[in-house]
Image: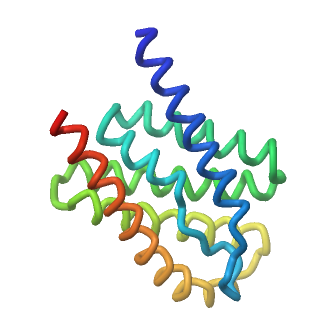
Amino acid sequence: MTKKITSVAMFACVALLCSYIEMMIPNPFAMQGIKLGLANSVVLFSIYYFSFREAYMISVVRVVLVSLLFGSFFGLAFSLAGCTISMIAMYLAYRSKLFSIVGNSIIGAVFHNIGQLLVAMILLESISVIYYFVGLLISGVISGCLIGLLCQKVVKQIKRQ
């Protein structure tokens, strides 16, 4: 049990570090909210390495710590909604056995963006932010694919050992 708690804490720290590194990279896109999602690689890997509960815990701890250290309440609301909806979608995709790690990553990225758009609609009391959806969908597919490929290589390496 102690080993599992330590491992989950270590994964949460790595995810936090990935979030911090990603914050240092300037956003070259005109659209706010588009990023690679390096911390999602840690969360995606944890779905395959731990149980859903532990993976969700890693994701929530990362989101809360990033918001407390570098963000705001609104950032917390956006990130928490995105992480919760994406974790549910990835868990269902993982359990269905219909998707590869890459497919699961794309699903997570797209649903993360959907969760954030839903929070934006609620906070702004308007559906006008829906115009962001196409851009976020495209970026979610691309970043999800890249993170999924990275995670797939890591999982293959670990299985070899």
Residue at left 50%, top 34%?
11
- Residue 151, compared with residue 48, is above or below; it is below
Residue at left 76%, top 48%?
67
Q: How is the image coloured?
A: rainbow
Is 97 positioned to the left or the right of 45 in the image? left
Relative depth, front residue between 78 and 29: 29
Residue at left 76%, top 57%?
75
Q: Quadrant of the C terminus?
A: top left
x%, y% of residue 40?
49, 54
Relative depth, front residue between 19 and 63: 19
Count the numbered circles shown: 0
Q: Quadrant of the N terminus?
A: top left
Residue at left 45%, top 9%?
2
- Residue 103, compared with residue 73, is above or below; it is below
x%, y% of residue 149?
31, 63
Is 81 positioned to the left or the right of 87 in the image? right
Relative depth, front residue between 27 and 113: 27
Is 102 positioned to the left or the right of 99 in the image? right
x%, y% of residue 13?
60, 35
Query: In which quadrant of the rendered view does residue 90 lie?
Result: bottom left
Is 146 positioned to the left or the right of 97 in the image? right
x%, y% of residue 64?
70, 41
- Residue 154, compared with residue 112, is above or below; it is above
